[in-house]
Amino acid sequence: MQPIPEQIPAALADYVLQSWVDIGVGEMIIQIEMKFPGRLDAARLAAAHALLLDAEPVLGCRMVTAAKPPYWQRLPPEGRSGFCQVETREAFEKFRIESLDATIGPLVKICLWNAPGGDRLLLKVAHHAADAGGTKDVAAILADLYSRLAGDPAYRPLPNVTGCREFEQIIRLVPWRSYPTLIRNCLHRIVIGYVPKATHALRLPDGPRAPFGYVVRHFTPDRVARMAAYGRERGATLNDLLAAAYYRAQVAVREWDGRSALRLQITLDLRRWHLPNERAEAVCNLSGWEYPFLGRNLGKDFAETVDRVSSLMRQRKRSWPGLSEVLLFTQFRRFSYPGLMAFEKKLFGGAMAAGNFPNSFTNMGPIAPERLSFDGVCPKSAWLLAPPIYPPLFGAGLSGYAGGLTLSAGVPESARSAIEAFFDAIGNELPA
C-alpha cells in the first residue's frame, strides 16, 4: 500500500475557490442532505467518516496558501474529527449553517440527527475539494465504507494517492485539431458577455452577510414528470425549463429596462460530458460553465423562452460543452496566490461596478439512489444545497433524486425574503 504523503499538491480549482472565499464571494461549501426511513449505526458511521479521510486523502487535509503553488497539508489524526450526532432539529439546523474553513480542515464533516420517523444525515464538503459531482462521489464512498464495515469491522480502504484532480484528465482527451474550435468558442463567449455591457440580473439587497441560511424548494416527482413531458414536446430538457423559468423570474421580480442583456451562467458536470465512464480519477472539481445568453430577446411567453434556451444549449452541446474557458483557466497557474486574489478581486469588482455580472444557475445533477445505499438502506429523499453566495452576487442550484427536483440557494438571512419571492416566481413559471 502506497503511503499517504504529508503534503498533496492543490489543484488549480482548489485554490481559486479559496481566493473566492478570501475576497468575499461566498462560503464555498456544498452539502448533501438525506432522509432515511429508519436508523443508521452512529458508531459505524463515525468509523466510515474516519476511513473516508484516508480513502480520498485530500479530504483529511488543510490548505496552505503561503506557498507557490498552494498545497494541502495532511492533518494529524487528532485534527481530523468531523462527525457529530445530535438529538434535536435545532442542533441539526445549526450544523447546516456552520462554515467549513478549508485552511483548518478536515474538508468533509457529517452530522447525524435521530429525527422522529427516521434519521437525517447531512454531509458538508468544502467546495475546494469537490464540486457537486465530487460531493456525490464523497457521499457514495461514505455509503460504501459504512456498508463494508458491517461485514468486516477491520476493513481499511486503499488510499487514492495517484488519481488526477486537475482538468488535465479531460484536456488530454481533447484532440489538438479541436483547439481552434475551443478558442473560437471562448472568444464568442467573451463578445456576447460584453455586448451590450450591462446585464439584467437579480440584485440582492445590502445587509449583513451573517448569519446565512438556505432557501429550498422541492418539486414532487408527479410535477417533475409533467414538466418533463412538456419539455419533450418542445425538444427541451428539464434544465432548459428551469433556466427559462429563472430568466423570466428575474424579470418578474426586478423590472427590466429592455436595454441590458439577459444573461445566465449555467454549470455542466464535465464528467458526464467528457469522461468515458463519467467518473473522475479522484474527488475533485470538474465542472465547466455554459452561457445561454438571450441578449435582449426574452420571448413573449414561457414557451418562447424555453425554445430560445433549448436552442442555445443544443448548439453548445455539439461543440465541446463546458470547455470554452478551460484552456484560459489553466493560465491562472502563472499567478502567485496574492496575485490571484488581486486579479479575482479586480475581475469581480469591475464586473459588479459595471452592472455586468450575471446570476448563476448550478445544475448539480441527479443523485443516484443506489450510490447512497448505506448497508442496503437508501434515503427516502436527498438533495444538494448550493454554496452560499454574498450580495450583490447570487446563485442557485438544482439537484434531483428519485424523480423529484430540489432548487436551493444559500443566502444571508437579510436576503431570505427576496429569494423566497424569486423562487415563488420560478415556480409560477413552470408547468404545474
Image: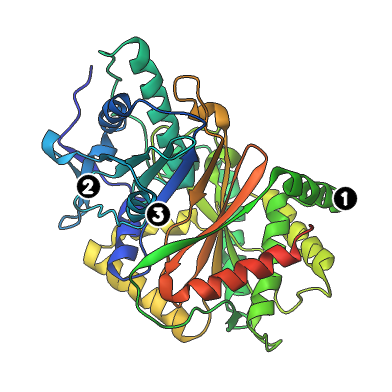
Residue at 71% across / 72% down in the picture?
248
Q: Residue furthest right?
A: 233
Q: Residues within 10 Å of mark 2 (few under 14, many from 20)?
A: many
Task: Using the rendered view, name the quadrant where residue 302 is placed.
Answer: bottom right
Dot 1 falls on a residue whose secondary structure is: helix
Residue type at mark 3: give it: Thr
Residue at 30% x, 57% y: name it: 99
Mark 1: which amino acid? Glu
Q: Which residue lies under the disc numbered 1?
A: 233
Q: How many marks?
A: 3
Q: Is residue 8 left or right of residue 386?
A: left
Circle 3 — which element?
A: helix
Q: Quadrant of the C terminus?
A: bottom right
Q: Secondary structure at mark 2?
A: loop
The answer to which of marks 2 and 1 sits earlier in the sequence is 2
Q: In which quarter of the view is residue 25 placed?
A: bottom left
Q: Are marks 3 and 1 in contact (CB under 8 Å)?
A: no
Q: Can residue 276 be seen here?
A: no
Up-down relation of residue 274 to residue 185 (above or below): above
Q: Amino acid at mark 2?
A: Gly
Question: Whole-percent x and y of residue 244?
Answer: 72, 64
Residue 105 marker: 2
